[in-house]
Image (cartoon, grey):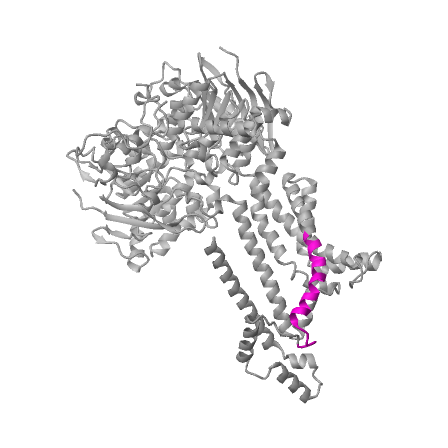
Amino acid sequence: MREALVEIRGLHVAFDGVPALRGVDLAIRPGESLALVGESGCGKSVTWLAALGLLPGKARVSGSVRLGGEELLGAPAARLDAVRGGRIAMIFQDPASSLNPVHRIGRQITEALRLHRGLDATAAREEARRLLDRVGMPDARRRLDAYPHELSGGQNQRVMIAMALAGQPELLVADEPTTALDVTIQAQILELLTEIRRETGMALVLVSHDLGVVAETCERVCVMYAGRIVEETRAEQLFATPAHPYAQGLLAALPPMHGPRRPLAAIPGGVPEPWAMPPGCAFAPRCPRASAACGAAIPALEDLAPHHRAACFQPSRPALCRPAPELLPA
Amino acid sequence: MTAPLLQAEGLVRRYHQRRGWLGHSVELRAVDGVSLTLEPGRTLGLVGESGCGKSTTGRMVLGLEAPDEGRVTFAGAPMPPPGSRPWRSLRARMQMVFQDPLGALDRRLTIGAQVAEPLTIHGLPDTPERVAELLRGVGLRPDQAARYPHELSGGQRQRAVLARALATDPALLVCDEPISALDVSIQAQVMNLLAEIQERRGVALLFISHDLRAVRQMSHRVAVMYLGRIVEEGEPDAVLHDPAHPYARALVSAIPDPARRGQRIVLQGDPPNPAARPAGCAFHPRCPVAGPRCAVDSPTLKLRPDGRRVACHVAQGEMAPGTGLAEPVRKAA
Amino acid sequence: MLRFLGLRLSRALLTLVLVVSFAFVVLRMSGDPALLIMSADAPPEAIAAFRRAWGLDDPLWVQYFRYFTAILHGDLGNSMRSGQSAINLVAERIPATLALTVPALLIKIGLGIPAGVYAALHRNSIIDRAVMLLAVAGFTVPSFVLGLLLVLLFAVQLGWLPSGGQDSWRHAILPIITMGFGGAAVLARFTRSAMLEVLGQPYMRTALAKGVPWRVAVRWHALPNAAIPTVTIVGFMIGSVLAGAVVVESVFSWPGVGRLLVVAVSNRDLAVVQCILLLVSATMIASNLMVDLLYGVLDPRLRAGAKGNA
């Protein structure tokens, strides 16, 4: 196992005293693709905004985020500026509002190139055109002078990706990159991300609520619930033999594409409010297997098998769990 | 076959869109000749991407928007003109559920008051007992009648919207992306609830969604829309397992599926602008099997022997598959 | 573009006609200039002569028509009080007014915008709260109250500055501060909220995520966006450089256009009032047009010929 590129330990975030992240441990190795999956409010996006110091000032962040041995939490602004868009780039959900409406997209890309690659104006413009070409923007040279509102959502997301690639990052964090896009455009963008990763060897962290998107794009998956990672394993493992009852519930709640149609196995209830967390396992109130122990203490993320960890007092052992046949890799 | 509850024929809706700051207005056909049929107690799924006209179609069958052409028949009688008295009393029998439950609810009124409102409007008994019964019917507690919308979670709000829609005991429910704004685990709850309500009350559903999995789960028939037209219609498993129209094929293949890794049809280009509708088959610039005929001759929706309706020269067997007409936008990976 | 300008100009003309007509009706209905100017105890023959001389005994619509034809010929009429040409009367007051309003405008912009930006960038800091407190005070306290308070403090109590008149530059200081402070307060509050809105936009996060240092992100990404709504207010302030001084000029007995207007209105001196109204409307309209054109420069989404997106 190679040394981690980014290592997050005990990351806690609270807004006005209300916890949003309650101890996240996560390591990303160079070149790997990792997904953070979970429902709204589970902390999957906050993890990366906190790691890169992009949260608003009222957020209280503690723990440790190390990039190749260098601590990022509390690092001086100049160091963070060099890391952001340099070694770690990030793209966001809504491409239309994530680009500055008053600047041409060429300028927005060259800004990153000049910051991280020190290119002069001419070289930066040429490189911006090459990047736009690279992300499949039709008619790239002319598009350099376009404004974001003149492009479609899919094209704007391509611009965001080009901008992220400007600093030749070792890690790209894509925060719900396709949620605001149509299905066929989502397919284009996921394909592009996978292709770029294969070509450049950068690591990819995909933050998503969509299990399908995650399964297709990533090798390893972390399932998050109420500010913690509850299960972490290889993608095919998760879809074949999920161990945590929440992960199982999420998969079962997904309407199948094949087989008879019957009522979905919905998870009862809703996510607990962050200011009213249950004392023990946050999933216990909704969990079909919950016992007294679950209400008393928070289960730690522990190894079940090699490359498979779950935070549950009664996880399904991989051998005991019946895989959903249609979700198995063909 | 039962008599249809809802029948729409040749619906057309045009908008005028201004180009730029001072530009001329351009005609935009949001819906361009849509016909559909829905039997009592059944569900028709309407799928397509943003701008394909599925929501406009939903509003037109309810009479919330008047079609520029075509007509709607409800329970055997033509739809009265929107806004008229007979239309308003008919509205008790058809209700709409929107994507954003918070936007659909009045923030200043309690849930109970909002559920009672349609009862009062249509002169039905609006007692607290009736409201409590409606709330129980959608899985809310009667004491939640005293809550305000912002005090409920997204899933609970959508349940409240449903309770309000069901208050007048409608025969038809048009659901426009009813689960898109909800979390995965809550989506399943709402889908189950809709199916259960349908079973219990025999209400017909027009289920509008971009999510093919949800549409399969909910529908008895599925219609796929592209640029204001239905391009394929049939049984869900027929359409979703073996789509005949190349657009339906691409759409199905775009469903993220844990079982498949990187072997799908990725459509090139963006969804086209309804204001600049391509000539011939609207899909031809993105179609991998388009031939020269597709650029001039617009295919009509025709019944195939297998009971499906498809609007495609190739899928109808009228021409051999071509190799696509679009300029290759980017090199193959 | 030409169509746009044509449209705007015809709308501006219509506005001018309405303003002039409205003022005519109101002024002529609310008092008799002959009695007001000649004073009520003047001999009846003198009053009748005055009426005849100014055409006041014609039916109202004849007066209105005559008045309008004159305006169309470029003749704004003479003051009923002094007999001088109304244009000259107004024109000779303009420099005095500008001597107050232009420095006040500079204070508004130079103080209000930076204060608003600073407050937004240091939200909830002590300085933010102080700026907002002053800003609230600045636009809740009417300018005549503020003016009188300043007079009490600096002229009466401390005796540092004169309380009124126009003898030296020192006389201009208090009126300028009175006007500048109120406007700066409005602008500070507005800039602050525009800035806060922009700072919360996803594109600001994008800028930081690509490694743009905070100061650069504020300058290059936030300010141009926050400028768009702020321009509206600044445009309005520029539009009111001629008319915005009515109250302050009265408080400080400053012989500008504003005070002329007050006197002319109380005398129902129609030609002078109309002349001032036309001037004020024209500057307002011009500054509005300027703001609209500036929007096009600042916001590419509003630029002509931009592609419509579905």
Please, is residue A44 above or below residue C91 in the view? Answer: above
Quarter residue B296 falls in:
top left
Q: Quadrant of the C terminus of chain B?
A: top left
x%, y% of residue C309?
Answer: 41, 43
Side (left or right) of B216 relative to C306: left
**Left or right of residue B29: residue C10:** right
Residue A196 image point, x, y percent: 43, 22
Answer with left or right where residue B210 lies relative to residue C305. Answer: left
> In the rendered image of this protein, does residue A175 appear above or below residue C56?
above
* Residue at (24, 37) in percent of width and height: B294
Which residue sits furthest top? A1
The reply to whether residue A283 is in sight is no
Quadrant including the N terminus of chain B: top left
Q: Is residue C223 magenta?
A: no
Task: Give whichever of A315, A4 is nearer the camera.
Answer: A4
Q: Residue furthest left?
A: B305
Dominant SS of magenta comes to: helix
Q: Is residue C308 at least partly visible in the picture?
A: yes
Is residue C90 part of the magenta span, yes or no? yes
Q: Nearer the viewer, residue A212 or A203?
A: A203
State which region is magenta. C80-105
Place of residue C197 in the rendered image (x, y in percent of width and height, measured from the top left): 56, 42
